[in-house]
Amino acid sequence: MELSNNELIEIKEFLNTHPKSHFLQSPEWANLKSSWIHEMIIVRDENNKIKGTMSVLIRKTPLFGTSIMYAGRGFVCDIDDKDTLEKLTAEAKKLAKKYKAFIFRMDPDVPVDNKDFLNLMLSLGYKEKKNIKTIDDVIQPKYVMRLNIKDHTEDSLIATFHSKTRYNIRLSIKKGVTIREGSSDEDIEIFHRIMKETGSRDDFFIRDSSYFKKLYDCLGKEHVKILIAEHEGTPIAVAMPVLYGDKVWYLYGGSSNQYRNLMATYLVQWEMIKWGLENKCNIYDFRGITGYWDEKSPQYGVYKFKKGFNGDEVEFVNELYMVFNPFINTLWKIAEKTYKFIGNTKERIKNLGKN
């Protein structure tokens, strides 16, 4: 469905003021995902005002002309409003029929302890994905770290950080680290180079620089920044935060293998948090953390770093889904497992020479 300019303006105004808004539910994010078909479901009240939306991405599969549907961090509405949730779900089912979807997946921005919401979703026909063991089992992080920044000043907020975190922020400033905002193609290449360096060091996949340029162009300066930390003119750390509604998310970040002692990553985090304060945001979201806060975990260092800013661990409800074609869904699961096995085997072979 093609949205008119007036509808887009109305939707963006709704998303920018709704407490359940999420950048993954925005039209701007859908523009980034141009290889997917995008549908925006809208539910209105008796006065024709928007009271709920759900951005749905649809992707064709090679299996008999079918597709998959996904609503990242949907819904955007009062999650206790059964009528709106029913209507959004009914429209999603219509889309599934239109696009021959065999499954519809979503991962709501709702804490796990909200049993009323989960029971309501189950009553509407959704199923709950269980036995989530690793980050590969989900699309979006099940656990995140969130910092409440509502009504804070810079001074009052930094006072809540752990003493070591405050020390590292001030040390970075004292050592001459500065933060600048990038925008040029050259800045995106700097960002990408340091992200690749980080991915190689910490063993995670990094997209091409063209993806980050497209992300920056689609979301625009209103919603995204490229931050580059430098020491004596040398880029040593980068980050890409996203601001939408009343939240800022730490979407991407990396650091050089050199100059680690300058604590630039602490200063970059503080710069992103300050962006949230400047825009009267309520929440700064550090994004994913492991669900196992054990010092023996390989991800404990990331958790400890984020925890130093005194955020709270948030566990979301499990992924919810509806299956419309069980046979095709079973074939898809087999294909996914095979693809992952081949990918992991290639990675093991590639790493043999490194040992």
Image (cartoon, grey):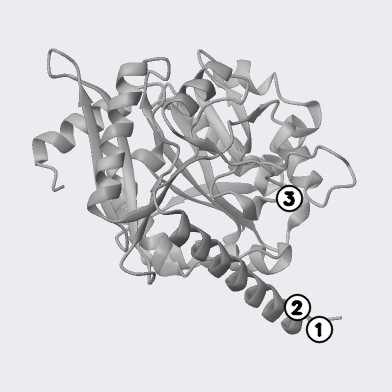
Label 3 neighbour load within 10 Å: few <14, some 14-19, many 20+: many
Q: Which mark is residue 348?
A: 2
Separation of disc 2 and disc 3 at Cα?
Answer: 34 Å
Q: Which residue is mark 3?
A: 262
Q: CA distance from mark 1 to mark 3?
A: 34 Å
Labels 2 & 1 near each other (Cβ < 8 A): yes
Q: Dot 2: what SS?
A: helix
In this orientation, which residue lies closer to the viewer: 43 or 180?
43
- Number of numbered labels in the structure image: 3
The crowd level at tag 1 (other Cα within 10 Å; few <14, some 14-19, many 20+) is few
Closer to the camera in the image, 317 or 180:
317
Q: Residue placed farthest to the bottom in the image?
A: 353
Q: Does dot 1 land on a helix, a strand or a loop?
A: helix
Disc 1 marks which residue? 352
Q: Amino acid at mark 1?
A: Leu
Q: Position of residue 67 (x, y in %)?
A: 35, 59
20 lies left or right of 48 = right
Identity, as a three-letter code, of the amino acid under mark 2: Arg
- Please name the residue shown 59% across and 43% down the image: 141
Q: Earlier in the sequence, mark 2 or mark 3?
A: 3
Q: Residue at x 63, y 52 (%)?
A: 137
Image-based side of 83 in relation to 71, left or right: left
Q: Quarter holding the C terminus?
A: bottom right
Nearer the observer, 149 or 26: 26
Q: Amino acid at mark 3?
A: Leu
Measured from the top left, where is residue 215 in percent x and y? 37, 55
Crowd around label 2: few <14 · some 14–19 · many ≥20 (10 Å): few
Residue 56 in view here: yes
- The residue sitting at 29% across, 60% down in the picture is 34
Q: Which mark is residue 267?
A: none
Q: Quadrant of residue 193?
A: bottom right
Which comes before the other along the chain, label 1 or label 3? 3
